[in-house]
Image (spheres, helix red, strand yellow):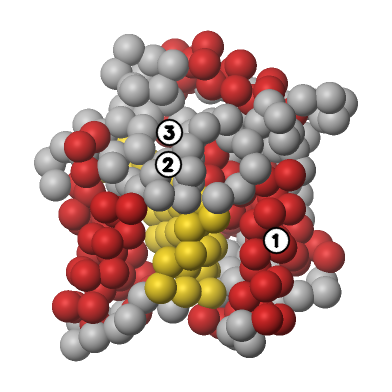
Amino acid sequence: MIILYAHGGGFVFGDALFLLDTYIDWIKAWKLSYGVRTQILSLDYLLAPEHPFPAARDNMLECYQWLINEKKISPSKIAFAGDSSGGNLAIISAIHLINQAYTDPPAALILLSPTVSGLGNTRSFIDNASNDITDVTWFNNSTNLYIGDSNLLPSCPMISPLFESQLLGLPKVFACVGSFDIFLDDVTAFIGKLQQNNIKTEFVVDDANMHGYAATRALSRGGAYDNTVKRIGKFLYGEKI
């Protein structure tokens, strides 16, 4: 598989090497367990506020088209992945593809603590604010910078895929979130919508873990990072050899 990965950072910071150690962990673990040669293409997408929506999404779609048209790679061999805001980009890019119908979507989505709503109005935003690494005020400010002068509302499905009504046609989805994550309720609700639309999903809530734990080992508790590596490997490749 080739994983087209979008890093997190609230759409306003981060770069393609942000999670290099994680990519290496994935490649090594899945080589050992499945005998596969996973390739990860980490996208250095344009950041807000200089480049608000839809610049980052368009970067992801352009890179996907490059893989298909220039490198001649079948969509069946490509997965979109991302953590936090990068998970958002993976989702909205896949939704754009199924709605436009000019290119097949990727074979899978891998979503690590994805941002699926820009509203920040769920109970977990209140209950988990003191336990999570993500500052609520910073999140709201970053969302506003990402929206920029587009006149879109935070509830617009292109910003908040939780409110997207057209989900049929999406590929299978792996998603995980920590029980201490402020996005817990949003992610849970989004996975529920996918399941209502008969999208194949694997969803894990890791107890006592905060935002970003699955993408950054240092934030992980109770072995959740390593368990996530194993789960994603099985999700992509099946049983061990």
**178 shown above or below 97:** above
**234 shown above or below 155:** below
- The answer to whether residue 111 is left or right of residue 216 is right
C-alpha span from label 2 to label 3: 8 Å
Q: Nearer the viewer, residue 126 or 64?
A: 64
Instruction: Give the residue type at disc 3.
Output: Leu
Q: Position of residue 108 (x, y in %)?
A: 52, 69
- The answer to whether residue 227 is left or right of residue 155 is left
Instruction: Give the residue type at disc 1.
Output: Leu
- The answer to whether residue 73 is left or right of residue 135 is right
Q: Position of residue 10 (x, y in %)?
A: 54, 31
Disc nearest the viewer among 2 and 3: 2
Packing grade of label 2 (10 A; few <14, some 14-19, many >=20) is many
Label 2 sits on a secondary structure element that is loop
Provide the residue designation for mark 1: 61
Provide the residue designation for mark 3: 184
Q: Residue at x 61, y 48 (%)?
A: 45
Packing grade of label 3 (10 A; few <14, some 14-19, many >=20) is many
Instruction: Give the residue type at disc 2.
Output: Ser
Q: Residue at x 29, y 18 (%)?
A: 131
Q: Earlier in the sequence, mark 2 or mark 3?
A: 2
Q: Position of residue 123 (x, y in %)?
A: 48, 19
